[in-house]
Amino acid sequence: MTSDMPARMLRLLSLMQTRREWPGQELADRLGVTLRTVRRDIDRLRELGYLVEGTTGPAGGYRLTSGTDMPPLLLDDEETVAIAVALRTAAAASGVTGIGETALRALAKLEQVLPARLRTQASALQQATTAPVSYGAGKDGPQADPALLAALAAACRDHEIVTFDYTTRQGPPGPRRVEPHSLVPAMGRWYLVAYDTRAEDWRIYRLDRITGPAPTAHRVPARSLPAPDPAAFVAARIATAPARHRAVATVHAPAAAVLARTQGLPGRVIPIDDATCTVDLSGGSLSRIAQLLAALDADYTLDADPDVVGYLRAAAERTLRRTNGLSRD
């Protein structure tokens, strides 16, 4: 039973914010109290300014609704990290006029009201995260664990060596020991830019392939990154990485126009003359290659692996089947 009333109230509010409606008895079971205690706690929430409606039905229940005043939000650690990451990314490159400054103001307000422990995490994320790298419209790929983001951001801020296991495409996880530099969102994934102390070279690591991160309490002087900025470094590494699916298009459009349409990475778009260029669309995702080809909005000839051609033909056939019955009016 949750006998600490403030802690129980916070737990109740957290539950109320996760679902549209809660049966009273289920709330009582979750909190380990009686239904009568739940009713008293609901009344206390109302006194604090939260609009809680009673619902009808066989068992009765409660619903947290919106009102004219915004009561305090209750966020757990992972939610706080997620909001800080979203605001920092929006501030860096949102594509929406004016939202960058607004996001920074919101992030500053969030940090002011956070407990010291969470404020430190949010501040580390703000310092370690750089502008996103975008290459086409693809958004597929695993997302980073907020706890992992927070841990690596702190290591970037403190210049603290970390160890972890890293899974490559070629084999099982292997140990890594690195000096973290920065975190970069790119193509629907998150990357850690770091100096590998064993390889004695700079590397990028996909966060969804990192397991068992551990700080070493060993801090080192900051190293100079061999690139204008972390985003440029990640972009260059992705552009030159071996691709699972090869696709190179000769496009009848100026290189500058193709770069604007595909948000191409360095070295991917090569001008042939003023009106023609080649663009290397090779990568690990067949759907992203198809999306990039559609974004070209120009005639092209394609030199690609058979699996790419097969995927494009199947996609075109599906599109034709679905559009044949549409009205031409």
Image (cartoon, grey):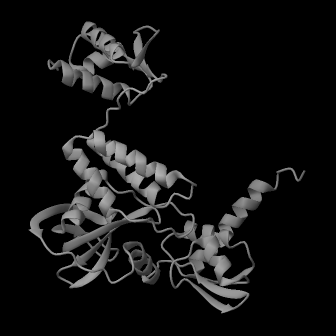
Visible residue check, residue 304:
no
Q: Horizontally, is 53 left or right of 327 in the view?
A: left
Q: Position of residue 130 (x, y in %)?
A: 38, 65
Q: Nearer the viewer, residue 142 or 70?
A: 70
Q: Position of residue 186 (x, y in %)?
A: 44, 66
Q: Position of residue 38 (x, y in %)?
A: 28, 12
Q: Position of residue 256 (x, y in %)?
A: 65, 80
Residue at screen point 28% across, 9% down: 40
Q: Nearer the viewer, residue 178 or 59?
A: 178
Q: Horizontally, is 3 left or right of 144 in the view?
A: left
Q: Nearer the viewer, residue 307 or 182?
A: 182
Residue 31 image-quadrant placement: top left
Task: Using the image, determine if residue 147 lies above or below residue 228.
Answer: above
Task: Using the image, determine if residue 83 lies above or below residue 34.
Answer: below
Q: Horizontally, is 258 left or right of 47 in the view?
A: right
Quadrant containing the N terminus is top left
Residue at screen point 19% across, 46% down: 117
